[in-house]
Image (cartoon, rainbow, N blue to C red):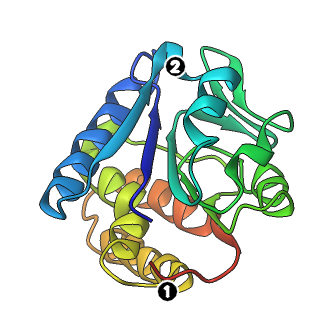
Amino acid sequence: MTNIIVAIDKEDEELGGFFEDCDLDLNNFFSEKHLSVNSLQNNQLNHIYIGLVTEPLDTFTFLAYSHGSDNELLSKGTPYIDEHNVESFKNSLFYTCSCHTGKSLGSQLIENGCLSYIGYKDKFIVWDFNRSPFIECANYAIKEIYSGIDTEQAVINTKAKYNEYIDNYSNDLIGAAMLRSNRDALTHLGKKLKL
């Protein structure tokens, strides 16, 4: 899937800096792979704009870095992906580190034709004391997928990467506990895809 869309809420007061760091890391990775990315930011994160971008695409990857809940992705407290536009992601690989979307939104996406969903069924936690492992783990599965690993194995590999950081997170039990929580919340729904 050469059509890659990244929705990123850089203006979020709480996590905007983290999302921006994830975006920079992804851009470096995709640039090395000679893949271009369509970046949607801030005011573009709404139902209408998302529909305009996804409608002409046969297949695509959609990456979301914003707040989430069981049933929606949010920007400035307003849903931009929910039950009103889940059909916009038919034939897509959907990947997000947004909180709780693995509880319900991921299933709604799959039921409406999304091929594969990777995300978190509980809260995704960020520890600014040592942000680097959180960025790497947030982006790890998508990098694995675009390096030829199937979605199912990419999630397994990401959990192993979490374990590496948990085991080596010396003198910071809080950070290790947060990484463990993220690892345990990571989930994959839908088909096993290999790009």
Secondary element under disc 2, as helix, strand or loop, is helix
Q: Does 181 appear above or below 88?
A: below
Q: Quadrant of the N terminus?
A: bottom left
State the CA–CA distance, disc 2 to disc 1. 32 Å
For this view, does 96 lie left or right of residue 27?
right
Identified by mark 2, the residue type is: Gln
Image quadrant assignment for residue 191: bottom right
Q: Badge 1: few (under 14), some or many (20 or more) residues near its Cα, within 10 Å?
A: some
Q: Secondary structure at mark 1?
A: helix
Q: Which residue is mark 1?
A: 153
Question: Which residue is drawn at the image coordinates 16% and 50% (left, top)?
Answer: 28
Residue at position x 81%, y 41% from top?
71
Give the percent coordinates (x, y) of residue 192: 62, 83
Q: Is residue 51 above or below residue 5?
A: above
Q: Position of residue 108 (x, y in %)?
A: 84, 54
Q: Residue at x 67, y 16 (%)?
A: 77
Residue at (66, 32) in percent of width and height: 51
Residue 111 seen anywhere in this rendered image of the structure: yes
Residue 44: mark in rendering? 2
Nearest the viewer among 98 and 60 is 60
* Residue nearest the observer in this picture, 107 or 92: 92
Mark 2, other Cα within 10 Å: few <14 / some 14–19 / many ≥20? some
Residue 110 shown left or right of residue 157 in the figure: right
**Three-letter code for the amino acid on which mark 1 is drawn:** Gln
Return the mark for residue 64: none
Q: Is residue 12 visible?
A: no
Disc count in the image?
2
- Nearer the observer, disc 2 or disc 1? 2
Q: Is residue 110 left or right of residue 13?
A: right
| Residue 159 image point, x, y percent | 47, 76
